[in-house]
Image (tube, coloured by chain):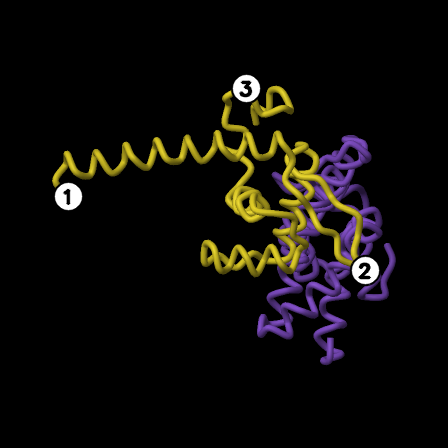
């Protein structure tokens, strides 16, 4: 590939494939990308196609790869999405509660905080610690 | 997917659910072995379909796992592929099926007077 930026883009996309795939097709895939770009196909389009292919490759169960590996990867992805959603859901009520608390009283209220409806208590606690750290106060 | 026997003589259309890219690759390989770039060029000419390189490798791996194509010894960095006997049989069954559906569709359009 003459254009170093195009080459970098394609190489980045190819690095997303599993190592087993790269060992088998990596060399040819790089050469194929160079030929397609020389023929006028945009480098971004080639890289995007490889990225989509890499995503498919990771989620497709192969005889050499255990199904549990794929299941674990999906589970980790789903869990991290769930935790993020939980943090987002708890952030709004916790912030609202802390604002009204600050208006009503200047000091921290002792005792455990009441969880807002629909908020997971385990997630709302770290939120409190972060808020307190931001204000440099401790209860 | 109902693969059945790997010899392709079950009469079942094993290519029904493998996707258009896989069928086009088999059609392209039907007249002789080709490597990735040659496949993309041939399919573009044959069906006016621009196969992305990511799609190509995904389909090649799938067809190889099904025993419908075989990789040949590499020439430099290029890996040519050839269609296997079960691959050719599966392609025949699929093309027959497509032909039947196509004929029925044309007939219905004629009967409907559209």
Disc 3 and disc 1 on one polypeptide chain = yes
Q: Which residue is mark 2?
A: B76
Q: CA distance from mark 3 to mark 2?
A: 38 Å
Quadrant where the N terminus of chain A sits is bottom right
Residue situated furthest left in the rendering: B113
Q: Decide which of A113, B31 is in the foreground and name it.
A: B31
Question: Does B87 appear above or below A109?
Answer: above
Between residues A12 and A99, which one lies in front from this camera angle?
A: A12
Viewer-nearest residue: B84 or B11? B84
What residue sits right under mark 3 in the picture? Answer: B10
* Residue identifier under label 1: B114
Q: Is residue B82 left or right of residue B48?
A: right
Q: Residues within 10 Å of mark 1 (few under 14, many from 20)?
A: few
For image coordinates 48% across by 29% down, the residue present is: B93
Task: Name the front one of labels 3 and 1.
Answer: 3
* Cβ atoms at labels 1 and 2 below 8 Å apart: no
The answer to which of A60 and A1 lies nearer the viewer is: A1
Chain that bears disc 3: B
Q: Is residue A95 left or right of residue B103?
A: right
The purple-coloured chain is labelled: A
**Label 3 neighbour load within 10 Å: few <14, some 14-19, many 20+:** some
């Amino acid at each position: 590939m003459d254009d170093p930026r195009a080459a970098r883009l394609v190489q980045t996309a190819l690095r997303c494939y599993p190592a087993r795939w790269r060992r088998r097709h990596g060399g040819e895939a790089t050469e194929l990308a160079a030929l397609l770009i020389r023929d006028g196909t945009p480098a971004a389009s080639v890289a995007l196609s490889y990225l989509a292919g890499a995503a498919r490759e990771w989620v497709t169960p192969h005889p050499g790869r255990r199904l549990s590996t794929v299941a674990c990867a999906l589970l980790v992805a789903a869990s991290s999405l769930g935790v993020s959603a939980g943090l987002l859901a708890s952030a709004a009520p916790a912030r609202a509660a802390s604002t009204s608390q600050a208006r009503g009283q200047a000091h921290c209220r002792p005792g455990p905080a009441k969880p807002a409806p629909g908020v997971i208590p385990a997630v709302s606690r770290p939120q409190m610690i972060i808020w307190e750290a931001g204000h440099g106060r401790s209860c | 997917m109902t693969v059945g026997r790997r010899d392709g003589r079950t009469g079942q259309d094993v290519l029904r659910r493998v996707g258009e890219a896989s069928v086009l690759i088999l059609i392209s390989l039907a007249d002789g072995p080709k490597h990735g770039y040659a496949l993309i060029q041939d399919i573009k000419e044959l069906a006016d379909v621009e196969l992305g390189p990511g799609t190509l490798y995904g389909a090649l791996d799938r067809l190889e796992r099904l025993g419908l194509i075989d990789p040949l010894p590499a020439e430099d960095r290029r890996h040519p592929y050839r269609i296997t006997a079960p691959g050719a049989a599966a392609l025949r069954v699929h093309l027959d099926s497509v032909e039947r559906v196509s004929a029925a569709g044309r007939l219905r359009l004629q009967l409907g007077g559209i």
